[in-house]
Image: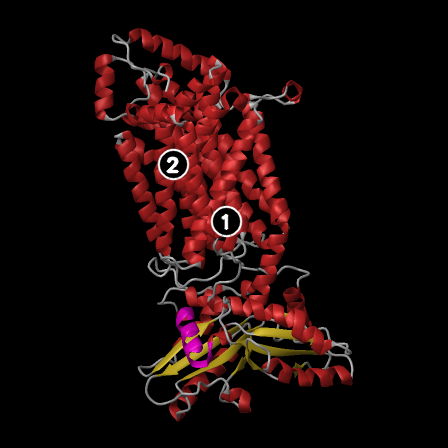
């Protein structure tokens, strides 16, 4: 690491130009190729997946995404001649567009079925637009062509809106307000921490360059594998948080070296050789946690894992290459004017932990049991809502109020009932007259089923070998009642109706698909969590050569994740403040959120564990005194950890401003986890437990010690050099200063 830092400092202009070239090249390539994101939740082997496959095989023209065009009149009815003529021409234009398989209009000879598409008050009607492809395979220009054709029909008295999965890709982005606010707050915190504008800007610069490069790289990645449309935003959220934090740790170490009298080159090299190693280690733990999603073997999550990992890798790379180059450019200006003046007048001075950090460290040492109990109570209370976690799908009713998808959703819900926004599809193969007779009689049975609002008669393909029915629930797609209806159909109604026939009805649709996706994830979640936690423990075992440290870290990380999910459930599922935040009404938690959040939160939680315990471990190796090691480690790292936490929390919470429900879930969960991790777990519960456990913190069986490879987050020679510098500085100090190292709690 020292050699890398030294090369980057000596060739600082080359390093900066290479990063600028990488950012410009990847961004240009992404803009040329365009994006190809895909929200493909389908899991092969599930019932909803089989239903989709049967529909594709039996009805090739209907296997694609079905969206809606909704029109509403304020004066008169949708049956008025001018409205009917306008919308009929519009629907004909839409039917002629590429990738549109068919358009079902309420005006063209549909009989009772057509009348069902006109509301009872006559003010709202809708048509179904069926694409030739699934929503994830429809490009934005193809969907936008449908939106433009429909919107062209709007007049003062005629409102036209569109909804559905494919139409959702045309939603206008919320701008970059979240990123701007997050970066601005982070900059303010850095300026307060450093007192130097130049030093405060460097972490922002490295994070923006690395995250910008990663954002463009994720767009390119979408052309080679399934990448969700929220993956770039998630990558940006994680990248800005960890990128600014990693740079903060290195700049803090660099400034410490300057205060001790080191030259700019030597201070930057020493910072990367020491703290830079911890940054690489922390980044590796984040990537391992993220890539743990690959064991779930779900294409949708594979793309998210790789995309987020690419972002973390690039932020770490920028922190240990671009950052030292920029530090050499600003020279002594990494220190504030007051610090530079004091250094010139008094010479090098030791930077000893004083003030609140030192007092808090001593306070924790005096009251470990009481403070540990308080921390456990706080975490437990916040984690309780997690017990009621319900996975499912939010719907377009949670979109911003200005979006056409939200307006279409509301118009349909008001005119026809909420279930029309997410009908269920029952698909089966038909073999013989008995099967056809049973299927023709099934709609009568379904109409009397609890939770069913309407049923369409069976529709057969050309050969009569496949048929489907559409079941409209009396509740919204995200409602628990709709999920219960899916279970009722699968376990009670359909098995009874199929008895004695060759029918094998498969239940598909939006809610069924999400429920199946959630069940697959829940089934594989224990293995996933076990692998992620196990790998993290192995890394900490190798780094700190202790059995207790990794076990405590695993417990703390699980506690942080549980408490963070408790906050998410309270806000998004129970609805505590969700409307106030502009995130729509209460609803279930997205089924993929637990997996992604466990990966991200476990990785981020490990960062603070590494930075805190590495300093304790260093002191333990030098003195063999556990109480001193914990006291010194907490006193010397708590300030920078708290500053880093404030930055991360600010960045994460700023993403709530974007108005996207999924990203807001990530932002609030990450912010809550980091706040609890930094202010409750790492600076309260962890040191309290370590004081109570004493020397047992560092116990490792001799047999295991002999076989484990030896790695070091901070190399011994750098540590020895650091102590030599400290000894020289101490000799230069005229008056001895009170040091938390020697003051027992």
- Name the spot of residue 702 as percent of width and height, x first: 64, 18
Q: Which residue is mark 1?
A: 218
Question: x%, y% of residue 109?
Answer: 54, 91
> Would residue 109 be visible to someone looking at this image?
no
Give me the residue at 49% from left, 44% from top: 561
**Viewer-nearest residue: 88 or 42:** 42
Q: Is residue 705 left or right of residue 480?
A: right
Chain-order first, disc 2 or disc 1: 1
- Which SS class for mark 1? helix
Residue 443 on image: x %, y %: 63, 83
Residue tagged 2? 679
At x 49%, y 14%, the residue is 624
Magenta highlight: main SS: helix
- Compared with 162, 726 (above or below) is above
Magenta-tinted stretch: 405-417
Q: Residues within 10 Å of mark 2 (few under 14, many from 20)?
A: some
């Amino acid at each position: 690491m020292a050699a890398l830092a030294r090369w980057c400092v000596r060739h600082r202009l080359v390093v900066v130009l290479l990063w600028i070239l990488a950012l410009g090249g990847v961004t240009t390539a992404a803009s040329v190729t365009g994006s190809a994101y895909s929200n493909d939740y389908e899991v092969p082997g599930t019932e909803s997946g089989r239903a989709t496959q049967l529909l594709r095989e039996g009805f090739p023209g209907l296997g694609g995404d079905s969206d809606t065009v909704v029109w509403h009149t304020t004066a008169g009815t949708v049956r008025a001649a001018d409205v009917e003529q306008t919308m009929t021409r519009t629907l004909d234009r839409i039917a002629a567009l590429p990738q549109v398989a068919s358009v079902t209009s309420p005006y063209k000879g549909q009989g009772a079925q057509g009348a069902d598409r006109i509301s009872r008050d006559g003010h709202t009607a809708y048509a179904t637009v069926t694409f030739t492809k699934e929503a994830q395979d429809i490009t934005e220009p193809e969907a936008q062509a449908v939106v433009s054709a429909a919107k062209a029909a709007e007049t003062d008295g005629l409102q036209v809106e569109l909804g559905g999965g494919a139409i959702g890709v045309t939603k206008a982005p919320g701008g970059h307000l979240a990123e701007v606010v997050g970066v601005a707050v982070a900059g303010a915190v850095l300026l307060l921490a450093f007192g130097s504008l130049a030093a405060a800007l460097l972490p922002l610069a490295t994070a923006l360059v690395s995250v910008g490069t990663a954002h463009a790289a994720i767009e390119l990645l979408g052309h080679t594998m399934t990448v969700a449309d929220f993956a770039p935003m998630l990558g940006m959220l994680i990248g800005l948080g960890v990128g600014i934090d990693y740079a903060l740790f290195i700049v803090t170490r660099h400034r410490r070296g300057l205060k001790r009298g080191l030259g700019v080159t030597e201070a930057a090299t020493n910072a990367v050789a020491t703290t830079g190693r911890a940054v690489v280690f922390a980044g590796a733990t984040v990537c391992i946690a993220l890539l743990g999603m690959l064991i779930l073997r779900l294409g949708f999550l594979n793309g998210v894992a790789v995309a987020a990992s690419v972002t973390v890798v690039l932020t770490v790379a920028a922190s240990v290459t671009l950052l030292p180059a920029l530090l050499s450019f600003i020279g002594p200006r990494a220190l504030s004017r007051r610090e530079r003046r004091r250094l010139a007048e008094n010479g090098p001075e030791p930077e000893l932990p004083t003030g609140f950090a030192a007092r808090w460290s001593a306070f924790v040492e005096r009251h470990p049991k009481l403070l540990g109990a308080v921390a456990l109570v706080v975490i437990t209370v916040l984690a309780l809502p997690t017990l009621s976690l319900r996975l499912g799908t939010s719907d377009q009713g949670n979109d911003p109020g200005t979006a056409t998808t939200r307006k279409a959703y509301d118009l349909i819900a008001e005119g026809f009932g909420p279930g029309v926004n997410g009908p269920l599809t029952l698909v089966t193969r038909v073999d013989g007259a008995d099967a056809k007779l049973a299927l023709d009689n099934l709609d009568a049975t379904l109409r009397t089923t609890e939770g069913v609002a309407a049923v369409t008669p069976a529709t057969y393909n050309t050969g009569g070998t496949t048929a489907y029915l559409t079941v409209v629930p009396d509740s919204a797609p995200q409602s628990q009642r709709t999920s219960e209806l899916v279970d009722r159909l699968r376990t009670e109604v359909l098995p009874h109706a199929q008895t004695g026939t060759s029918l094998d009805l498969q239940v598909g649709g939006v809610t069924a698909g999400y429920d199946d996706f959630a069940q697959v994830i829940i089934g594989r979640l224990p293995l996933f969590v076990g692998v992620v936690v196990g790998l993290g423990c192995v890394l900490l075992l190798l780094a700190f050569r202790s059995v207790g440290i990794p076990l405590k870290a695993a417990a703390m990380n699980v506690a942080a994740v549980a408490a963070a999910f408790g906050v998410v459930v309270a806000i998004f599922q129970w609805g505590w403040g969700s409307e106030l935040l502009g995130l729509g009404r209460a609803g279930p938690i997205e089924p993929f959120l637990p997996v992604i959040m466990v990966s991200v939160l476990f990785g981020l939680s490990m960062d603070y564990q590494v930075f805190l315990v590495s300093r304790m471990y260093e002191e333990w190796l030098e003195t063999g005194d556990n109480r001193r090691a914990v006291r010194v480690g907490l006193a010397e790292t708590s300030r920078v950890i708290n500053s880093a936490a404030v930055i991360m929390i600010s960045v994460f919470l700023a993403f709530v401003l974007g108005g996207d429900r999924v990203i807001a879930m990530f932002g609030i969960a990450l912010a809550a986890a980091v706040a609890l991790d930094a202010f409750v777990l790492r600076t309260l519960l962890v040191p309290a437990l370590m004081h109570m456990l004493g020397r047992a913190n560092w116990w490792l069986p001799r047999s295991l010690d002999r076989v484990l490879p030896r790695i070091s987050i901070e190399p011994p020679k750098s540590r020895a050099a650091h102590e030599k510098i400290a000894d020289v500085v101490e000799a230069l100090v005229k008056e001895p200063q009170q040091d938390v190292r020697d003051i027992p709690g």
